[in-house]
Image (cartoon, rainbow, N blue to C red):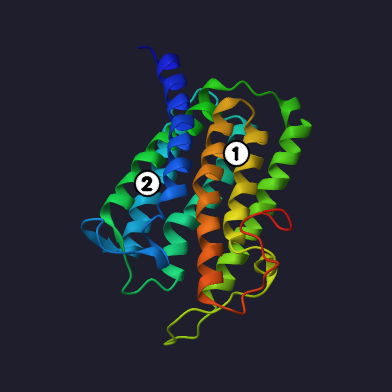
Amino acid sequence: MNEPELFHAAVALEFGLAALTVVLLIFVTAPYGRAVRAGWGPSMPSTFGWVLMESPAVLLWLYIFGQGQHRAELLPLILLGLWQVHYVHRAFVYPLRMRMAGKTMPVVIALSAVVFNVLNAYVNARWVSHFAEYSQQDLLRPSFVLGVTLFVLGLGINLHSDEVLRRLRAPGETGYKIPQGGLHRWVASPNYFGEVLEWSGWALAVGGVPGWAFAVYTFANLAPRARSHLRWYRDKFDSYPSARRALIPFVW
């Protein structure tokens, strides 16, 4: 199998994983965060698990991008910057800032995320730096401009929503509270909504099927989890606002 064939197989595999993921998560709540529970084998500290599972999206992506024939062109470099801003934060900043001391996650969850991030890093980095053909005119392409705008907007929503959650409890406090502020006023998982916007914007900006493979997977992975979060909040708090939706403000 030559590389173009391997690449297209990897893209198809990512779409297949999206379909499998949405089906599994409709019936099984992913066992990490507040949903961690026994029966999923050995566990590891959550901070280490986050770094382990997200770092391929930074390090492997950089390596693959550096092998591409278009690696020195302006538009691929802009896309490189967008990707790294998200994943450097997700891999190395987020797990150190969020209060994860004493929390664990199943090893199997971390390793499955490593496998996906290796696949996704290859698909997106190789497309952007090698297989896609961009020109200077693409910098003014409406889908590129809209895509970058959505990505930046989604990133801002994601970061702000995480910060609201980080500040929800004072140092030393335990237990759960109802988040307030920002898009938390309208949806149970605004951080997930931000990621859906980001990677939908990414798909528009990069053009082609590979970008949409990640956008579709993101929705397939996060939508069922957002629904589970909404159900958890409503079961936990009688005062939880009834107007709040799971993922998309005013819609769902």
Q: Is residue 144 above or below residue 88?
A: above
Q: Secondary structure at mark 1?
A: helix
Outermost residue, top side: 1
Total numbered labels placed on residues in the image: 2
Q: Residue at x 41, y 55 (%)?
A: 29
Q: Residue at x 62, y 35 (%)?
A: 203
Percent position of residue 84, x then y: 52, 47
- Residue with the mark numbered 1: 79
Asked if the residues shown at circle 1 and circle 2 are in contact, with their CB atoms under 8 angstroms apart, the answer is no
Q: Residue at x 48, y 35 (%)?
A: 19
Question: Are there few (<14), some (14-19), or many (20+) residues within 10 Å of tag 1?
Answer: some
Would you identify the image quadrant in which residue 137 lies?
top right
Instruction: State which tag comes first along the sequence, 1 or 2.
Output: 1
**Which image quarter is the C terminus in?**
bottom right
- Residue with the mark numbered 2: 113
- Amino acid on which disc 2 is placed: Ala
Q: Secondary structure at mark 2?
A: helix
Q: Is residue 209 above or below residue 200?
A: above
Give the left or right position of residue 107, taking residue 136 as reference: left
Outermost residue, left side: 42
Give the left or right position of residue 53, taking residue 26 as reference: left
Q: Is residue 212 above or below residue 38?
A: above
Percent position of residue 67, x then y: 43, 27
Would you identify the image quadrant in which residue 24 lies?
top left
Give the left or right position of residue 203, taking residue 30 as reference: right
Residue mark closest to the camera, 1 vs 2: 2
Percent position of residue 144, x then y: 72, 35
Q: Is residue 214 above or below residue 247?
A: above
- Amino acid on which disc 1 is placed: Leu
**Which image quarter is the N terminus in?**
top left
Percent position of residue 126, x then y: 48, 28
Marks 1 and 2, how far apart in space? 22 Å
